[in-house]
Image (tube, helix red, strand yellow):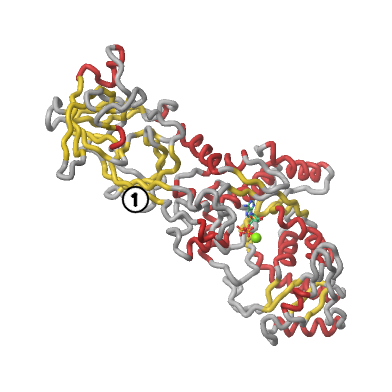
Amino acid sequence: MMNETSNFIKTIVQNDIESGKVKNVITRFPPEPNAYLHIGHARAIITDFEIAEAFNGETNLRFDDTNPAKEDEEFVDAIINDIEWLGYHPKKICYGSDYFDTKYEMAIRLIKKGLAYVDEQTPEEIVANRGNFNESGKNSPWRDRSIEENLELFENMKNGMYKEGEKVLRAKIDMSSPNINMRDPILYRILFMHHHRQKDKWCIYPMYDFAHPLQDSIEGVTHSLCSIEFENHRPLYDWVVKECEMEHVPQQIEFGRLNIENTVLSKRYLRELVSLGFVEGYDDPRMPTLVGLKRRGYTPSAIKNFVKASGLSKVNSTISLSMLEHFVREDLKLKAKRIMAVTNPLLLIIDNYEEGKVEYVEAINNQENPELGERLMAFSKYLYINKDDFILEKPNKKWKRLALNVEVRLMYAYFIKAVSVDYDEDGNIEAVHCTYDPETKSGSGFDIRKPNGTLTFVEKTTAKKALFNIFEPLFIEGSEGKDFKDRINHNSWYTYEGYVEKAKDEFNELESFQFIRDGYYTVDKNSNNDNLIFNQTVALKSSFK
Ligand code: ATP
Ligand code: MG
């Protein structure tokens, strides 16, 4: 089931099974519940779930909620929903914070083994004494205090006897290690903060590098898959599992992150876009969040196919936005009904058509997928076409639309010819008068004469009024490298008022359609049958304009 390009992880897992090292594959997706998921996370989710699935294993959703600062129940619920929406079902939903007791015990175990100590250097001193790539670090003056003293001080830390930043618990590893992560990393710090699940039970919180391997081990995770920036943390991961004498030994494997051209995929920036009001919310259709993409009309299969096609390797990859768009077009191509809408209406009056009469012509819902059936489309004396489908005088041979004294076919209906124009007081074209040829019903006049193109239209009296949201990228093209706030395209959401044919009685939220000659559109969450709102999911690549 997995894409061949993801084979490097699959091969490792396969080998582990064949060698007997692993029996039941268990993976986990470990988001920090501090924002909504974005399309980059989809790569991690797909990898975690599908690797396990390929070996009849299991995947847990584990909230990495050991940092109390930014966590929120709203994000927990949103993440659960997003994963279900993508079509994955976690075996268990776990919370890193549920294991705080075990982590505390493990910290004591390390102290007792002489492998952890309470440091009293200031945060600034700790940073300064850590050294850098060229310089090894300096031992803390508190590094060699006795096990008894460390046990007592750590207990005092837990009991709230010190201020934040006054003391930390550090692993005693090697201040001159070439890997800076191994230079006596901090295991616990003091934070007088309310935790979303643990409430006020704790005032010391474990650091990610200490908590994560323990969580994986406790849950029996066999393959802990994560993005490449954790590669340098792997020695510490292994150290924690080993020195805490954890029964179960998980294996961390890293893969490259997925980035999308001219798109910001970082929770910090996504949070800022929301909090500074640059977007409507996390589900703004311009956002690269899963909820944003969903509202825009992206389907789970479009996202999965895109992510799989992007491949999986050890290096980060940046994929073009057009590739993402390609996959949603591909997915909607056969699924979406192709109907007609007019986003910028111009009234047509068919002079030789009977006043008050409405007739119905047959229309095919999707020429490439007969299963979607047919529908009836209204036609009458009053119609709308798009403004840019009409011009007074045909400018050149390439103009395959309507002009005065030029005949076009209205798709599924008749040939019409423009004969005159009404103007409003300001001299703008208000309506175009046409004549139709009753002999050409359903476009059957092709053998008689060739019209100057085919137009889409809607019938005025039956059409439904609608708003059409059209989006541009949220970031100005080529603005990479500039300050985040200067990159924002403030004109990236346009709304047009127009009409959609009454192809159904009700247009339901998240239903997608192809508006012929225009693009794919999806019914917005704020839409209802009195106020229809469509979001343009993606424009058609080549319309027959
Ligand atoms: P961000 O950088 O957006 O803040 P994060 O890595 O801090 O993301 P987490 O909630 O920790 O967010 O992510 C959960 C998992 O998703 C991690 O294992 C992380 O490696 C993975 N992940 C996050 N972003 C990407 C990405 N762009 N491509 C692939 N995997 C990702
Ligand atoms: Mg993270």
Q: Which residue is under mark 1?
A: 527
Residue sitting at the far top: 447
Task: Point out the image quarter for the N terminus.
Answer: top right
Q: Is residue 287 left or right of residue 25?
A: left
Badge 1 crowding class, 10 Å Cα cut-off, few under 14, some 14 to 19, many 20 or more, is: some
Q: Residue at x 14, y 25 (%)?
A: 352
Residue sitting at the far front: 395
Picture coordinates of residue 172 (x, y %)?
84, 72
Task: Point out the image quarter for the C terminus.
Answer: top left
Q: Is residue 386 above or below residue 249?
A: above
Front in this rendered view, residue 96 or 526: 526
Picture coordinates of residue 37 (x, y %)?
56, 55
Q: Is residue 280 above or below residue 381?
A: below
Q: Is residue 246 visible?
A: no
Q: Residue at x 56, y 60 (%)?
A: 483
Q: Is residue 405 left or right of residue 492?
A: left
Looking at the rendered structure, the kind of residue marked 1 is Ser
Front in this rendered view, residue 275 or 47: 275
Q: Is residue 412 left or right of residue 99?
A: left
The number of discs equals 1
Picture coordinates of residue 19 (x, y %)?
84, 44
